[in-house]
Image (spheres, rainbow, N blue to C red):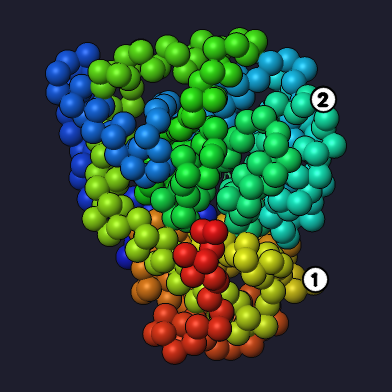
Amino acid sequence: MTGHRGRHFLQIPGPSPVPERVLRAMDMPVIDHRGPEFAKLGREIFEGCRTVFKTSGPVIVFPSSGTGAWEAAIVNTLSPGDRVLMVETGHFATLWRHMAARWGVDVDFIPGDWRHGVDPAAIEAKLVEDRARAIKAVMVVHNETSTGVLSRIPEIRRAIDRADHPALLLVDTISSLGSADYRHEEWGVDVTVSCSQKGLMLPPGLGFNAVSDKALAASRENRLPRSYWDWAEMLKPNTNGFFPYTPATNLLYGLRESITILLEEGLDAVFERHRRLAAATRAAVRGWGLEVLCQEPSEFSPVLTAVLMPPGHDADRFRKIVLDSYDMSLGAGLSKLAGKVFRIGHLGECNDLTLMAALTGVEMGLSVAGVPHRAGGAAAAMTVLEGRDDTNAAPRLSAAAG
Ligand code: PLP
């Protein structure tokens, strides 16, 4: 126990804080998962998921972390020796690539500098080159949680279409769903992978695959073995609101409530709130005289901001000082960014004052840790939140949606 009073500030880019309403909704007796009451819950959840993923097709819900949902996407669509195209946007794209390779999939991994998103032109060039149509899937991470870079999925879709290539499009929305604009069907995505503990504001434990007809057709022919992850086994009982095995019932109660919360605010309003909070955070970073890791303004993440430490200063030492002094968790730099960046999560239940508390904690932490910076970053964030300075804003929703 730390002796701190008040609530812990969980400002990592997921798991994000679970709202009281969601906690209360999960505080329920477990029910018979083969009974009529469960069927109603199941149907409501599948319907709600379709609204959030923006699809009229099935959304499969696994009791799993996001990594499980990654695996489900691979084993239901690909075959050993299949070629796929992936892009090194950061730590999570790299992990997904390793998983695909372990399943015997041949990954063409376009190198990246971990400061930019997927370049749609590079995808197009690779697909145009592939005259034999050997590439079976393009697999990209929408919001790269390790870097705070949001890739432009509609532009990637258009690149695939321009190349007139039949590859499936698989997208990891693990840290973007429910926080950044996302449209499974309109954007022509074949498998959308997601999970519960970020924009959906739930505890960890649910993984999702939204699937297109084309992906379902691929799953009837592909040759990777699966049992627990098999879409067909899931979809049969799902039609009536049930699951083939014991579902995570209480997380599903939470999911029903979190979808209600998102829809009460309105998805567009939710995305706009995240965009504002991210713009304010970047204003703070610039105010401190520090650097945002993402170098492309049209790819700034609405979910998190990764901040580069000045040379010679260890981000993990700084994070420890913030945790010890102010009871706030900031995200660590992952793999090759370890010690070099810290990440500020501004997703889920976050509002203006939560963000201001977090940014104030960062600013005080920079002082206590002796990290060279200018004072006044938090004040710069206030001007953005008050609407007095919109110069740090990312493109508005309508423009960004493209
Ligand atoms: N993909 C992205 C973009 C992530 O941010 C994460 C986790 O943070 C994962 C995949 C892995 O998800 P999980 O830790 O739930 O297995």
In this rendering, the label closer to the viewer, 2 or 1:
2
Q: Secondary structure at mark 1?
A: loop
Q: Nearer the viewer, residue 170 or 315?
A: 170
119 to 100, vertically: above or below: below
380 to 256, vertically: above or below: below
**x 58%, y 88%: residue:** 375
Which residue ends up furthest to the left in the rendered image? Answer: 36
How busy is the neighbourhood of tag 2: few (under 14 within 10 Å), some, or many (20 plus)? few
- The numbered dot on residue 312 is 1
The residue to which callout 2 is attached is 132
Q: Is residue 91 visible?
A: no
The Cα atoms of the two marked residues, 2 and 1, are separated by 50 Å
Q: Nearer the viewer, residue 247 or 125?
A: 125
**x 38%, y 17%: residue:** 235
272 to 223, vertically: above or below: below
- The numbered dot on residue 290 is none
Q: Is residue 200 visible?
A: yes
State the image quarter where residue 2 is shown: bottom left
Q: Position of residue 299 (x, y in %)?
A: 62, 62
**x 35%, y 56%: residue:** 267
Q: Whereabouts is ligand 1, in terms of quadrant? A: top right
Q: Nearer the viewer, residue 140 or 311?
A: 140
How busy is the neighbourhood of tag 1: few (under 14 within 10 Å), some, or many (20 plus)? few
